[in-house]
Amino acid sequence: MALSKASEWHALAKYDFAQHVLRNSGTYFPSLSEMKENEKVPDTLSGVKKRINQLENQHTSDLENLFKYQGQLYMDDALHRYEQYDEVFPAGGTQQPADAFTEARERVMEDSRRDLSREFEDHVEELRMAHLHATQPLLKRRKELEAREEAERKRRDAQFPKSVDEYHTIRNKDIQVRVARYLSADKGQQEKIMSEFGWAWRQVQPLLDTYNSNAEFKNEVHKILKDVEARDPRRRPNSMQLG
């Protein structure tokens, strides 16, 4: 079945765009090697974020190449229309359409401009869909890992050492300082901290009793907080205060 002239033009335009994609990206969608590369991405939040950033950068580069390609197409089309345009000047020197043929040709050229605009929009949409196809699984995995990390954070926050020995086994400095601040706070502030981190009285009472009865442990807690304040620039006196 023979194609119409318009169908032939669209087919050639699609072929030309496909060749552009192959020259610059290799394919619309991830190749087998790229999919295998995605499988090698460390299943960690930082690893997945890094791969997403790589794909975002590649998409930006692909768009830049596409816009250059479209710019050249537009210039070629404008030059073609210019070369096809016949000017007819009557005696007075005023430009006017020559005849019905010229008017029909103008309509065809206007249709060509609209077709080119739609073609450009299709190019961008195809590139966008290819990018989404590549990133959607990673975005889904990032969301899962973020939820897992948040759940782990809440689990850690809800923990409270029952004894001095357990307190000493805490490897996370932030958690150790948080417990120290709770122990040294007044009762009202302690209740706020308990509410913030989901601690219950039965959790905190054993270590709190030890803190109140064990001078050595209390001094240790105060030293930890003093060291933190010394390293925290927000708690250092400024030059005006020193003066």
Image (spheres, rainbow, N blue to C red):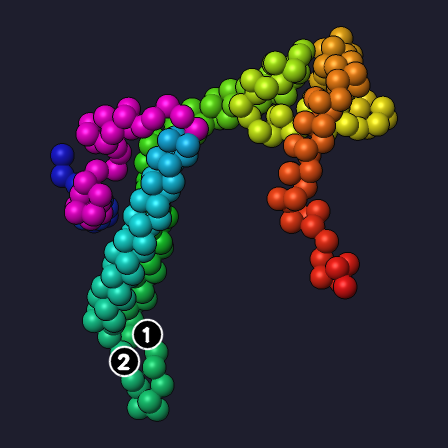
Q: For the point 27% across and 53% down, which residue is it?
A: 65
Reading the image, the residue beneath label 1 is: 97
Residue 175 in sight: yes
240 and 52: which one is in front?
240
Hey, which residue is sitting farthest bottom in the picture?
A: 92
Q: Measured from the top left, where is residue 34 in percent x and y?
A: 23, 31
64 and 47: which one is in front?
47
Q: Measured from the top left, where is residue 226 in percent x and y?
A: 69, 38
Q: Measured from the top left, where is residue 39 in percent x and y?
A: 28, 24
Q: In which quarter of the image is residue 153?
A: top right
Hey, which residue is sitting farthest top in the picture?
A: 202
Q: Quadrant of residue 31?
A: top left
Q: In which quarter of the image is residue 28?
A: top left
Q: Measured from the top left, where is residue 40 in percent x and y?
A: 27, 26
Q: For the point 26% across and 34% down, which residue is it?
A: 29
Reading the image, the residue beneath label 2 is: 88
71 and 37: which one is in front?
37
- Whether residue 220 appears in magenta in the rendering, the answer is no
Cβ–Cβ under 8 Å for marks 2 and 1: yes
Q: What stretch is highlighted in magenta?
A: 17-45
* Above or below 98: residue 179: above
On the rendered image, what quadrant is the N terminus found in? Answer: top left
* Above or below 204: residue 229: below
Q: For the point 77% across and 27% down, which residue is it?
A: 184
Secondary structure of the residue carrying numbered label 1: loop
On the rendered image, what quadrant is the C terminus found in? Answer: bottom right
* Above or below 201: residue 29: below
Hey, which residue is sitting farthest left in the picture?
A: 1
In the picture, measured across the screen, residue 135 lies left or right of residue 150, that is: left
C-alpha separation, residue under disc 2 versus residue under disc 1: 7 Å
Amino acid at the residue labelled 2: Val
